[in-house]
Amino acid sequence: MSVLTCSTIVGAASGRRRIVTPRKGDYDDLPLPPEGKALADAWDPKKDEAAGEQVSKITSARYDSATQTARVATFFDAWQNGGQVKRTVRDDLICFIGYHELLDLWQRADLSPDTVAGDCEMTPFSAQADRLVLFGTRVED
């Protein structure tokens, strides 16, 4: 069994949540560069099924409002033509922070925010934004 452990800081959390495999090309809500979109377009689930390759994904999440964190465990089971199952486990700890806290962290790290956007198209950030995109420069002494 493989185990991946990740920690993520999320500046804003909202938008669509996926619980099923999306239709081909249904990735407009994901911040993918052109290379990522090309990879997503190249994936052919029917080809995997024809080869007998199958993957099952199970996800469990627990949100702790006191610490504003979520622990997410994802289990991927892969097998081919009834063979042995290979399990990969991904364990994520997600820390949710707000706009002002993120700006404070940037300033404590001697970074100056140059651009604060609400999406990957660099639309100005607002309370209705699905995400927070922050670009800045290091403050020189």
Image (spheres, helix red, strand yellow):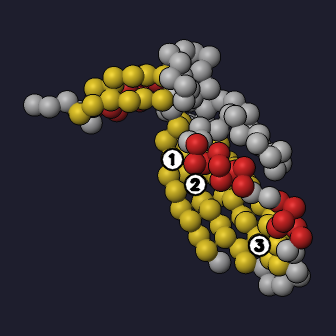
47 horizontally vs 40: left or right: right
Q: Position of residue 72 (x, y in %)?
A: 64, 52
Would you place residue 84 above or below residue 135 in this image? Answer: below
Total residue callouts: 3
At a point 53% along the width and 37% down the height, the residue shown is 10
Q: Secondary structure at mark 2?
A: strand
- Specify the amino acid type for callout 3: Ala
Q: Tell me if mark 1 has few (under 14), some (14-19) or many (20+) residues whose alpha carbon lies within 10 angstroms of its own.
A: few
Give the mark nearest the N terminus, 1 or 2: 1
Give the mark nearest the N terminus, 1 or 3: 1
Would you place residue 125 above or below residue 97 in this image? Answer: above
Pointer 2 residue: 92
Label 1 to label 3, Cα distance in Å?
Answer: 25 Å
Tell me the number on the disc at residue 8.
1
Say whether marks 2 and 3 touch (CB < 8 Å): no
Q: Secondary structure at mark 1?
A: strand
Q: Position of residue 95 (x, y in %)?
A: 52, 42
Would you place residue 34 above or below residue 137 in this image? Answer: below
Say whether marks 1 and 2 touch (CB < 8 Å): yes
Which residue is more in the foreground, 77 or 44? 44
Tell me if I can see residue 14 in this picture: yes
At a point 83% along the width and 60% down the height, the residue shown is 45
Tell me if I can see residue 64 in this picture: no
Tell me the number on the disc at residue 78.
3
